[in-house]
Each structure stands twice: as structure tokens, then as C-alpha cells.
Amino acid sequence: MKCVLDDFLDKVICGDSAEVLKNIPDNSVDFILTSPPYDNLRSYKGFVFDFETIAKELQRVLKNGGVLVWIVGDATINGSETLSSFRQALFFQSIGLNCHDTMIYQKNNFSNPSQTRYHQIFEYMFVFSKGKPKTFNPIKDRKNIYVGYSTLGENTTRKADGGFSKNGKRTIQEYGMRYNIWKGNTAGQENMCKHIAHPAQFPLWLARDNIISWTNENDVVLDPFMGGGTTGCACKELGRHFIGIEIEPTYCQLSTERIQNHKCCAPELPLK
């Protein structure tokens, strides 16, 4: 028998997501944001996760129109990238989610210099949706160099039959919508000279900007691999409810305390 949603709100639940998720009601979560442990790049104290079971549960609890952002990369084993990220993406698609976008989180630095390939500085942000996304709040912080100018000549769009449709002239605004490659600091750079207790914490700005983009105030955000509590901290700043699940007891305590002690300091972002 499943619990009511209120039993889970604004808490970090210590347990295996494959089991805890079974108690969350169907179609009850607005947004899922997570970065799972992948390809044994971190030992994670011996814990492993049942990806397919968890993926099916995430699809079930997500509302129609809800969005899931899966931030993941690939290890290189015996000279070959595993492509686990793509297999996971295809599995999400096979259980009924749309691959709404394939975004890139590009880091401002890299931790492991490469000798036989170019330095690895990004992770995928697969954006899945359960039907058409019900919310999109585009962040418009990309400075336009032609601000104030109007479009020149005929503004056309290529149609499916090869012809063109004409669009009206427009004046270029100061800021435009971001591209789908997001470049920024890692958690280590965000917390320069501070101790980070979790081995694979993603940056607060990344959680914050995803939550802004795909949710509205008071929406419910789920992170099934809560880790250091970053998703919960971002939700606290932005007036969203969160549900965190974390299998490792030390990290459960860490994330709970971090969220409780987090001081809200979200910057103003230019939106639409």
C-alpha cells in the first residue's frame, strides 16, 4: 500500500531508491533531477543500483507533462568508452519517456588529464519528458551582440516540403535564450578551499538552473540519488518541495544537515 505524497516532502529518505520509490504515489512528481553513480567511477562504499527497476519507478511517479533530467557520463575501460549513458537513455525511451533534448554540462576544468585523447570536460544532461513538457521557463542570460538592431532582409524558415515561410521583422533584445550547452564551474570550483564530503557532488548552479527551467513554485522535485543534498538546497532557494532518496547513511545525514543549514542566495536570472 503506497503512502501519501506528504509523507515524503522536504525529507531525505535513507534507503534504496528501487524500494523507496515503490511507496511514492503514481503521477505525483513534477520534476526529477539527478546524477547517478555511473560505471564504477566512484566505489560509493560498495553500493550499486538497479538501474532498470529505478528507471521504471521514475517513469511511474512522474506526472504527465513532467520532466526528468539525467546527468551522466561514461567511463573509459580498456581504451573504450562504455556508452552506458546511451544505453540508459534508450531504456528510458523504451519505457515511454520522450527524449526531449540532449544537453551538455561543460565543466570549466578537468580533473584527469588525458594523454591519448582530448581532455574530458563534459557530461550529458538527457532531458526526458512524459508527454509534452507542461512547464518551460527559458533562462535568457545570453548577451546578444546586436542588441537593438532589427533583423535584416527577409526572415524565413525552411518548411518540410523544401519551401520557405516568411516571418515578421523583430528587434533583437539585450539577452537571448541559452543554448543547450551549459558551461560553468564544478562543485569544487564553487566551493574553492572548502571541504566537500561527497565524492561526486554536482554544482549548485546546475541544479538551480534546471529547476528554474522545468518547474514552478511549489512543484515537487525528486532526486533518487541525493548524495550531498545539492538538489534539496536549490529547491530551498527556489520555493520548491523536494524528495531526496539516498542509500548511504553517512550521505543521508550529510545532505539533511546541508539543506537545513543552507542559506538562500539565488541570483536573479533574466527569464522570458
Image (cartoon, rainbow, N blue to C red):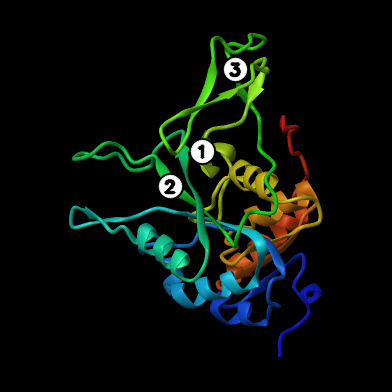
Residue 228 numbered tag: none
Give the residue displayed 68% in from the left and 18% down from the top.
173
Residue drawn at the location 59% of the way across and 65% of the way down: 251
User: Mark 3 or 2, which is nearer the eye?
Assistant: 3
Residue at numbered disc 1:
180
> What amino acid is labelled 3 in the image?
Asn
- Between the residue at mark 3 and the residue at mark 2, the CA separation in whole angstroms equals 26 Å
Q: Report, in whole angstroms, how far the alpha carbon at label 2 lies from the one at label 1.
A: 12 Å
Q: Position of residue 88 (x, y in %)?
A: 41, 64
Residue of label 2? 123
Residue type at the position of mark 1 = Asn
Q: Quadrant of residue 140 in the image? A: top right
Is residue 174 in view?
A: yes
Q: Nearer the viewer, mark 2 or mark 1?
A: 1
Taking 58 as reference, is 84 above or below it? above
Q: Quadrant of residue 52?
A: bottom left
Judging depth in this view, the residue of 148 and 12 nearest the camera is: 148
Residue at image point 27% right, 36% down: 118
Residue 248 at x, y percent in the picture: 55, 71
Residue 144 numbered tag? 3
